[in-house]
Amino acid sequence: MSRNLLTRWFSPVAFALSAMMTWSAVAAEPIVFATKSFTEQHILSAMTTQYLRKKGFAVEPRTNIAAIIGRNAMVNRQVDLTWEYTGTSLIIYNHINKPMSAEEAYQTVKKLDAKLGLVWLNPAPMNNTYAFAMQRKRAEKEQIETISQLVAKMDEVRKNDPDKNWMLGLDLEFSGRSDGMKPLQKTYNMQLDRPQIRQMDPGLVYNAIRDGFVQAGLVYTTDGRINGFDLKVLEDDKGFFPSYAATPVATQETLDANPGLAEALNALTPLITNEAITEMNKRVDVDHESAQKVASDFLKSNGLL
């Protein structure tokens, strides 16, 4: 074989091999995976990291990242993957307060972020939104299942026993937000006198409900203390609170460099229901187990680890 012929044969092969080596180097780059600074996100971080590593992906977890900082890092490609909530993206990042169904919210943020090269994968069937909760035994005794029934009970007490006001526990932020307490009152025709409102740190609301300091309070629907303190979440029967569906979000470049990543995450998300994540949150916050162990147990119980 002549040198010229050898050169002509070798060059395409060498180029292909070089390209394959370059692609492998890109694919081998660890996926920078960021999550926020509360229990649920710690569990999602541990779960996703263990699961993806088992699948053969290199993952570099970064925890306790503030929402806005994490968002900017995604946009600037300093972070490759995160778990985001539809309501957070809709309201905080895109400043949209229009009432939407869960599907409308998901499709809206998915479309908006596609313009930035951010891909929303399949959402988990969990919704970490606001809700009102009561002691379960009290709610059952008073036959209160919905926020409308709560409002009716409060009105009844106000009219028939004004010295026995029902009190609501609210966090300071929700009380003052333009999309918080005032529009909620309008939606539910909720008449509140100042003595009926107890403002406190969000974490204290759960204790206040459990201990009877307030008759009902604003909670997050997947908080572990709902199970741990045997609280009953009331149905938002007028659909006031936005959907906060937890969803994996990745940069398009990361999905391109890691074939099978989207499919792997989409296989995980259907398992993370409200019931599953609430129980996991309870095991960490109330039973004081580690997020790593709780995540590992969940993956093993579903045959993923």
Image (cartoon, rainbow, N blue to C red):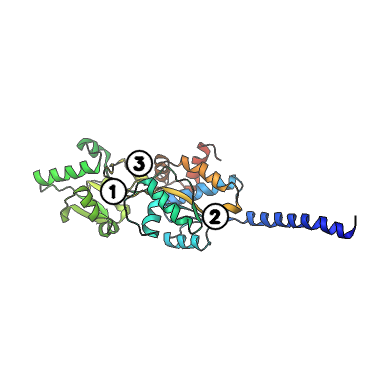
Whether residue 199 is situated above or below residue 164 in the rendered picture:
below
Q: Nearer the viewer, residue 287 or 219?
A: 219
From the viewer's perspective, tell me whether residue 111 is left or right of residue 31.
Answer: left
For marks 1 and 2, give the CA distance: 33 Å
Q: Nearer the viewer, residue 205 or 270?
A: 270
For the question of whether residue 296 can be seen, the reply is: no
How far from the left and from the top, in percent, is residue 57? 60, 49
First of labels 3, 2 by sequence position? 3
- Helix, strand or loop under label 3: helix
Which residue is identified by label 1? Answer: 240
- Helix, strand or loop under label 1: loop
Query: Disc number at residue 252?
Result: 2
Nearer the camera: disc 3 or disc 2? 2
Q: Are marks 3 and 2 in contact (CB under 8 Å)?
A: no
Residue 177: quarter of image = bottom left
Nearer the camera: disc 1 or disc 2? 2
Question: Crowdedness of circle 3 by 10 Å Cα count: few (<14), some, many (20+)?
Answer: some
For marks 3 and 2, give the CA distance: 38 Å
First of labels 1, 2 by sequence position? 1
Question: Crowdedness of circle 1 by 10 Å Cα count: few (<14), some, many (20+)?
Answer: some
- Helix, strand or loop under label 2: helix
Residue located at (29% from left, 59% from top): 173
The total of numbered circles placed on residues is 3
How far from the left and from the top, in percent, is residue 190? 19, 49
Residue located at (49% from left, 51% from top): 45
Residue located at (48% from left, 58% from top): 115
Instruction: Indicate the amino acid at tag 3.
Output: Asn
First of labels 3, 1 by sequence position? 3
From the viewer's perspective, tell me whether residue 255 is left or right of residue 3.
Answer: left
Which residue is identified by label 3? Answer: 227
Instruction: Indicate the amino acid at tag 1.
Output: Phe
Instruction: Indicate the amino acid at tag 2.
Output: Gln
